[in-house]
Image (spheres, rainbow, N blue to C red):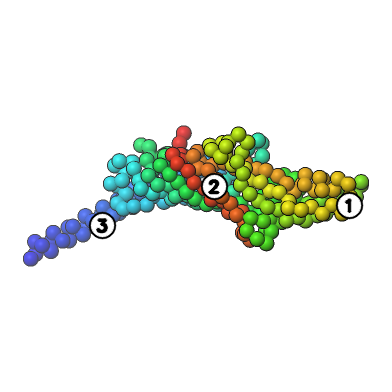
Amino acid sequence: MRIVRVVVIIAVVLGALFVGVDRWAVGYAENRLADRIQARQGLAGGAEVEIRGFPFLTQALSHEFERVDLKLTGVEVAAEGRRTRLSELDASFRGVRLNGDYSGGTAERADGTGLITYADLTAASQTGATLSYGGAPGKVKVAASVDIAGRKLSRSVISTITLVDAPGSGGGAGGKIVRVRAEEVPGEGIPGLERLVRRQTDFDRTIDSGLPAGLRLSALTSDEAGVHLTLGGSNVQMAGS
């Protein structure tokens, strides 16, 4: 009976040690990968990585993981010299294979969500227009001022925000464009007023180009918090040199 008790105690101690080592190892790998992703993406915010599954060490031996979750803040993407900031980007990577030093990896598939606040969308417009919630999903309110015949006029319009294929993409790997278009601009009989207002309120922005390679936009909508993006892809690079 005493021998059995001793064996049980030893098993418990070894189990506790294994769990402790396992949790330390997963923490090291998560921090290593997060630092690499943050450096590569040039984040204004930060990166958090969570490697799912237990035990970690058995997965680590093969460098293959069922799921890795990634949370980014302050993601800044640039296209054609224009910058757009994503306040948040959350993604789950499945079928992940990490390289030897955990500085990067590739996932068989990934899906996630992103958020562009109205403050960041206003900055992305680069026209001086101010954007806010338009009162319904997929709608934004755009306020702008224009000069016409020496007179400054302020106008607010309700615009539709949509996701369209980039020129020449054919819906494939060429990427997507976030498009903002006013539904109606009151002209009030003033020649050229609608054209001037639309110059301020209507714009396109490419976002795909700054996301992890292989991760693409698939849908978007809007609410009081901002514009919510839906993303997905296959053979997605989490980081790398």
Q: Residue furthest right?
A: 149
Badge 3 density bin: few <14, some 14–19, many ≥20, Cα 10 Å: few
Question: Which residue: 61% across, 47% down?
Answer: 163
Residue 50 image point, x, y percent: 41, 51
**Badge 1: how crowded within 10 Å, few (<14), some, or many (20+)?**
few
Front position among marks 2 and 3: 2
The residue pinned by badge 3 equals 16
3D distance between C-alphas at marks 2 and 3 = 44 Å
Q: Tell me the residue that label 2 is attached to.
A: 218
Q: How many marks?
A: 3
Q: Earlier in the sequence, mark 1 or mark 3?
A: 3
Q: Residues within 10 Å of mark 2 (few under 14, many from 20)?
A: some
Residue occupying the point 76% across, 53% down: 184
**What residue would you read off at disc 1?**
189
Q: Is residue 141 left or right of residue 90?
A: right
Q: Amino acid at mark 2?
A: Ser
